[in-house]
Image: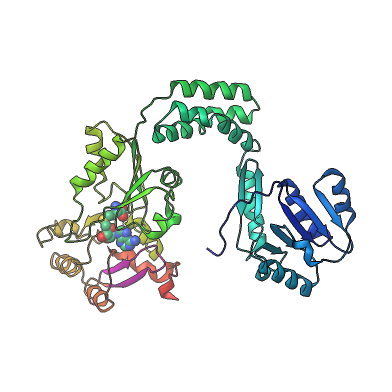
């Protein structure tokens, strides 16, 4: 983070603007909105600025060159002249006195920069690209402007009026948060936006009167997809941003975890092959316990929770204990890896069906119906199969699959570091070991793998 966004209270404080042209005028308008006491210094001042002085009493215009004493008592200096030497000089003088300074279009001379602002006061959204691309900031502002209702500020004001009352009525912080979240998401905002403030206020009051002292927790069992955060569903993202606490697995990529609400508590419950630091039973109990305390608990799992995810077991326990839950599907590793490797899982010419199989060994043995798996018109996808790769290849060949059947192993599928190894049942394992592939990996066996040569579209950072 090159700049820390803060909101600056300028009401009644002195700001200096050096410069009297168009650019100075735009900054001046913003400072007027912020209620600052403003001095404009410039040998020549535009009429627009002079006119503003008639409306805005806290504006003092000095038509003369800048002088050192102009910095006295200023908390913020804005420099908007086209004299580069003067700009640099004022920036230096201000910084020597620890006064924040903004030199328009010269970020290297600034201690503070202006964001693009979406103003729904008291709600404000400030957008910055760190001065790198003001045009991008403006485009984003346009998008956010379109997203936020014009009367959003009124909604915030209404909430502000009832803040103390809600605090007094609902002592428990969780109950209070749940109350506000429900009020701010349902019919009350609609009344505000329809300019029906008295109705909005009475609805809010009756909600407060009926608000339960205890809140009800809930568990969101959410599929986080194979790794690329762009592959999350909208619902996954919405619930991730609401959660109070998140229990996540090893497969959750840092990029996906980053999308969880900033102040949510994070609990890692990952299992690694062979070691089980947190047992499944512990996780199930923890979910029940956290939800009963009134939390919105996000159980974030890699891929899809219902595909080799033990999601079913977790919600069985919730159902037994009467805890509310919802399930959000995710893109499973097979779909994600196949897409990003350019391997269609089915294809009219090569595979009429696809099977998802676990390659995880129970007691060091892989117990699968090998004969049933040998079918040249079906694609086989093996999850958890890195250790068993040789076993799987040998068994398939032994039970009648062609040894030159194409096969691919996708490592870190959909992520920037994705690697894809291709070969045949006979050769793939050797290539994979030579390249020291590491989990997570997914094995795809079938004639569709041959299509990758033409359909491979995704260039990961390792392929550059
Ligand atoms: N519920 C998950 C699967 C959990 S089992 C899903 O639907 O995807 C864990 C296995 O998923 C790993 O051993 C690996 O085979 C596979 N896997 C998950 N993410 C992967 C990724 N990004 N790249 C390759 N394989 C992945």
- Does 76 sit left or right of 260 as displayed? right
Image location of residue 425, percent across then percent down? 23, 71
State the residue in front, 216 or 148. Answer: 216
Q: Nearer the viewer, residue 394 or 35?
A: 35
Work out which quarter of the rendered image holds the C terminus and state it. bottom left
- Which region of the structure is painted magenta? 405-423
Residue 184 in view here: yes
Q: Quadrant of residue 431?
A: bottom left
| Residue at image location 34% in from the left, 48% down from the top | 246
Quadrant of res 150: top right
Q: Residue at x 80, y 72 (%)?
A: 83
- Residue 100 or residue 147, whichever sits in front: 100
Q: Quadrant of ligand 1?
A: bottom left
* Percent coordinates x, y for residue 385 in the rendering: 22, 63
Q: Is residue 47 above or below residue 165?
A: below
- How far across and how far down the image is residue 405, in percent? 25, 69
């Amino acid at each position: 983070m090159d700049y820390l966004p803060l909101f600056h209270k300028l009401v009644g404080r002195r700001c200096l603007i050096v410069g009297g042209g168009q650019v100075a005028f735009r900054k001046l308008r913003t400072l007027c909105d912020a209620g600052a006491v403003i001095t404009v210094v410039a040998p020549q001042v535009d009429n627009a600025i002079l006119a503003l002085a008639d409306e805005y009493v806290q504006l003092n215009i000095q038509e003369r060159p800048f002088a050192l004493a102009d910095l006295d008592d200023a908390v913020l200096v804005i420099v908007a002249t086209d004299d580069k030497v003067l700009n640099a000089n004022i920036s230096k003088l201000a910084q020597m006195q620890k006064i924040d300074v903004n030199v328009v279009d010269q970020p290297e001379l600034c201690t503070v920069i202006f964001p693009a602002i979406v103003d729904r006061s008291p709600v404000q959204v400030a957008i910055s690209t760190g001065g790198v691309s003001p045009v991008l900031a403006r485009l984003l502002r346009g998008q956010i402007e379109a997203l936020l209702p014009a009367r959003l500020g009124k909604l915030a004001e209404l909430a502000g009026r009832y803040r103390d009352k809600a605090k007094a009525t609902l002592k428990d912080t969780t109950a209070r948060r749940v109350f506000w979240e429900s009020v701010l998401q349902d019919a009350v905002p609609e009344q505000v936006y329809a300019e029906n403030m008295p109705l909005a206020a009475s609805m809010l009051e009756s909600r407060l009167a009926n608000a339960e002292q205890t809140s009800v927790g809930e568990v969101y069992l959410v599929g986080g997809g194979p790794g690329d955060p762009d592959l999350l569903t909208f619902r996954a993202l919405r619930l991730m941003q609401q959660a109070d606490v998140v229990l996540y697995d090893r497969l959750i990529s840092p990029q996906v975890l980053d999308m969880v609400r900033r102040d949510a508590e994070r609990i890692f419950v990952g299992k690694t092959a062979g070691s089980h630091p947190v047992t499944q039973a512990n996780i199930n109990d923890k979910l029940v316990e956290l939800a009963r305390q009134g939390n919105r608990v996000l159980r974030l799992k890699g891929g899809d929770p219902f595909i080799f995810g033990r999601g079913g077991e977790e919600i069985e326990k919730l159902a037994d204990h009467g805890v509310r839950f919802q399930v959000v599907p995710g893109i499973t590793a097979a779909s994600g890896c196949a897409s990003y490797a350019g391997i269609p899982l089915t294809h009219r010419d090569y595979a009429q069906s696809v099977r998802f199989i676990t390659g995880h060994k129970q007691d060091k043995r892989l117990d699968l119906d090998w004969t049933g798996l040998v079918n040249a018109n079906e694609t086989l996808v093996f999850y958890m199969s890195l250790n068993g790769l040789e076993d799987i290849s040998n068994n398939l060949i032994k039970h009648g699959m062609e040894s030159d059947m194409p096969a691919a192993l996708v490592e870190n599928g959909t992520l920037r570091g994705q690697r894809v190894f291709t070969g045949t049942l006979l050769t793939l394992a050797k290539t994979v070991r030579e390249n020291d592939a590491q989990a997570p990996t997914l094995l795809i066996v079938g004639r569709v793998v041959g299509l990758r040569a033409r359909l491979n579209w995704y260039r990961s950072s390792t392929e550059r």
